[in-house]
């Protein structure tokens, strides 16, 4: 063959022995389907977000109601504690004794003063100690009444729950 003949020789295409080459073509998806699929995904995520926000609002409302109810119950507990302390107070017991039982204080007071025959330093010390003890008992009783009334009127912190 000459050079001129080589230019005009038709080269036959060779067949590809692998049949997968035809399958490797990319299939084109319609853009309308892609856009519709994207829109559905966006819509689903937006609806999920709105649902979550609505659920959060409902739970916040329930929590607010529960806190309001807790506050009411704490005030009721404080009121009941004050009522209990008043019922145990000596003034209330005395008033009930006068009104319901018809009891009254005696009209006259009888004082008996006993003088010792002889005064010794030990006897004077003992009488001073007994006077100090009576004052201490009176102050202690007053302090107990006032502290229980104050504890009952305050919100219940940890020291009030422990029963101190």
Image (cartoon, helix red, strand yellow):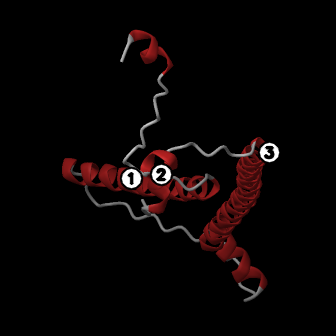
Q: Which disc, if any, is residue 32?
A: 3
Q: Which residue is mark 1?
A: 131
Q: Disc 2 on helix, strand or loop? A: helix
Depth check: 119 or 95 in front?
A: 95
Q: Is residue 125 left or right of residue 45?
A: left
Q: Which image quarter holds the C terminus? A: bottom left
Dot 2: within a 10 Å radius of its alpha carbon, few (fewer than 14), some, or many (20 or more) residues? few
Whole-percent x, y for residue 85 in the image? 61, 67
Whole-percent x, y for residue 63 in the image? 69, 57
Dot 1: within a 10 Å radius of its alpha carbon, few (fewer than 14), some, or many (20 or more) residues? few
Depth check: 137 or 128 in front?
A: 137
Residue at mark 2 to residue at mark 1: CA–CA distance: 12 Å
Name the residue at 45% across, 45% down. 21
Q: Disc 1 on helix, strand or loop? A: helix
Name the residue at 45% across, 64% down. 113
Dot 3: within a 10 Å radius of its alpha carbon, few (fewer than 14), some, or many (20 or more) residues? few
Q: Name the front one of labels 2 and 1.
A: 2
Q: Which residue is mark 2?
A: 139
Residue at mark 3 to residue at mark 1: CA–CA distance: 104 Å
Q: Disc 3 on helix, strand or loop? A: helix
């Amino acid at each position: 063959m000459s050079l001129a003949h080589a230019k005009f020789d038709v080269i036959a295409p060779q067949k590809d022995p692998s049949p997968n080459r035809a399958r490797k073509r990319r299939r084109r998806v319609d853009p309308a389907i892609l856009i519709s699929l994207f829109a559905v995904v966006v819509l689903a995520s937006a609806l999920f977000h709105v649902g979550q926000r609505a659920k959060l609002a409902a739970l916040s409302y329930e929590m607010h109601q529960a806190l309001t109810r807790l506050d009411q119950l704490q005030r009721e507990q404080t009121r009941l504690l004050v009522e209990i302390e008043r019922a145990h107070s000596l003034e209330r017991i005395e008033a009930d004794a006068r009104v319901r039982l018809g009891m009254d204080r005696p009209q006259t007071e009888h004082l008996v003063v006993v003088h010792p025959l002889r005064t010794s330093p030990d006897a004077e010390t003992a009488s001073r100690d007994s006077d100090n003890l009576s004052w201490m008992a009176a102050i202690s009783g007053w302090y107990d009444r006032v502290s229980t009334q104050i504890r009952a009127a305050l919100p219940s912190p940890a020291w009030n729950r422990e029963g101190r």
